[in-house]
Image (cartoon, helix red, strand yellow):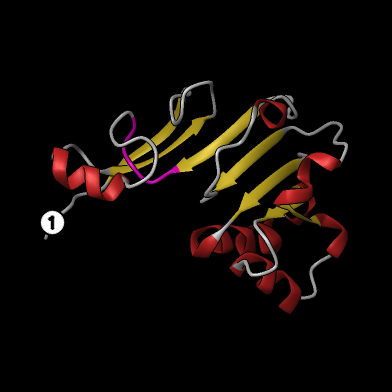
Amino acid sequence: MRNNIFFADDIVGLECIVYLIENKPDEIHSIIVTDEGSTVYKKLLEINYDGSKIIFNRDFLKNSFEDIDYIFLLWWPYIIGEKTIKIPKFGVINTHPSLLPHNRGKNFNFWNLVEDVPFGVSLHFVGEKIDGGDIIFQNKILKSW
């Protein structure tokens, strides 16, 4: 069993969280949501998920976390700071919708078309540079009009 924190947003984050709740519930320490209007938060309320494990992003650093193995960013829209990066023992893992190092940051889909570079998805450790940490896994996706 691992002790993990999941920052999740939008439909992709929601699908990941639903999967984890159904298949790996003991590995969830906390789920961080953007705010009360978040798709993830609304779903957690709908399924009566344990409210003590739900934390709003604005309150995240007000908490004290010990023995956290990983933090996962599941379609998280914000850059996280150094204090957050230092919390887990083994690192912070980000899901990124491009074939890194191509199209770092936002607007990955626009720049992918403009720059005509390979397209795909990446899992990577969060480092000092935006979308610049060590790559864990990548999958190329064919693109077409």
Residue under label 1: 144
Depth check, front residue: 115 or 96: 115
Q: Which residue is drawn at 27% across and 50% down?
A: 109
Tell me which segment is drawn in magenta.
96-100
- What kind of residue is marked 1? Ser
- Badge 1: how crowded within 10 Å, few (<14), some, or many (20+)? few
Q: Residue at x 86, y 41 (%)?
A: 63
Where is 134 relative to 104, above or below? above
- Looking at the image, residue 109 sits to the left or right of residue 129; the answer is left
Q: Is the magenta stretch mostly helix, strand or loop?
A: loop
Q: Which residue is drawn at 88% across and 37% down?
A: 64
For the N terminus, give its image quadrant: top right
Where is 15 relative to 136, above or below? below
Residue 89 pos. (x, y %):
74, 24
For the C terminus, give its image quadrant: bottom left
- Looking at the image, residue 51 sits to the left or right of residue 91; the answer is right
Residue 81 pos. (x, y %):
64, 31
Location of residue 39 by image quarter:
bottom right
Depth check, front residue: 64 or 90: 64
Is 13 covered by the magenta stretch? no
Q: Is residue 1 visible?
A: no
Residue 50 pos. (x, y %):
84, 65
